Amino acid sequence: LMQPSCDVQTWNDHIGKYLKGNPIILIVVLAALASAMHRVFNLPRLILIIVGQSSQGKTTVQQVAQSAREQAREIENCAGTANGIRARLEQNQDCPAFLDELHLAENLDGLVKLIFLVGNSASRKTSAADQKVHEAPPLTCGLIAASEKTLAEIVATSRTTLTEGISARLLEVVVSGKNGIFHKIPEGLTPKQFSDQLKTACETYYGPLWDAWVSGLSRNHEKIAVRLPAKLQEVEAELCSELQITDRVTTRMVRGLAVWVCAGHAALKMKLL
């Protein structure tokens, strides 16, 4: 990775300040930060897919989260084989990984299995010509994807089925507002102008948030490990306070959401956001 191009305050002055009032941007950034917490604190993992038509800001919001760790660049699409996609995900262990255009995957069944493996932080065993079993490393990245279709719509014309196991590990946020991904736009700007402004900022200001975040998690590991279980229960209860959730699929999803919320609380305590 490149060295950070600025300090945390500068990143917030140009990018982070827009998280307030733009909940989808906030969710994506928190999902990215949480990717550093899952394995070290043994937390459930939730995959995020932003669903919306073209020119709604899906790529922009991914690049905002990307800039927390590295210089924003074009988000790679899913064109290619499941093995090729897996190889890319393996390069981002305990970090956020970004994918676009899920429907371009050549093997939809392989794509769904990959999503399940990421959601479980699981490895994959294969056999080779030498008759030995080879085990690939577990996928411990945080997956943040974008698509013009929901996963159910993508697999609808194939023989691939979506099980409860997939549903419990996946949150799809459908973009349908008049301003696309954005809820609050700076005065005097159109959604397109705001999107272009953010993209330019993400190419210029990048890296400090992730460095400070990982350092803070390491420095406060024991304190976080002690307090986190109670905080997670508190957040889960708050998320479900006006709902009667009894099915295990939604319960598992809520646990994943609670991890993102706790990541946000920790980032605020570290004065990173």
Image (cartoon, rainbow, N blue to C red):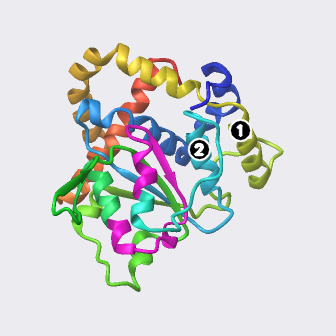
Task: Check whether the beta carbons of the residues at disc 2 and disc 1 lie within 8 A of each other.
Answer: no
Image location (x, y in percent) of residue 55: 69, 63
Q: Can residue 98 be seen in this snapshot?
A: yes
Task: Determine which residue is flagged by label 1.
Answer: 203
Which residue is at 51% across, 28% downward? 210
Image location (x, y in percent) of residue 222: 25, 15
* Residue 88 in magenta stretch: yes
For marks 2 and 1, the one nearer the N-term is: 2
From the image, state whether disc 2 or disc 1 is nearer to you: 1
Task: Determine which residue is flagged by label 2.
Answer: 22
Q: Which residue is at the far right?
A: 188
Does 31 sit left or right of 225 as displayed? right
* Residue 213 in magenta stretch: no
- Nearer the observer, 235 or 81: 81
Quadrant showing the N terminus: top right
Q: Amino acid at mark 2?
A: Asn
Q: Amino acid at mark 1?
A: Glu
Q: Give the SS element for disc 1.
A: helix
Write the start and end of the magenta stretch as one range.
86-112
Which residue is at 40% across, 56% downward? 86
User: In the figure, residue 116 lies in which quadrant?
Assistant: bottom left
Q: Give the SS element for disc 2.
A: loop
Does 73 sit left or right of 175 as displayed? right
Which residue is at 59% across, 29% downward? 207
**How would you rate the neighbour count of disc 1 (Cα within 10 Å): few for under 14, some for 14-19, many for 20 or more?**
some
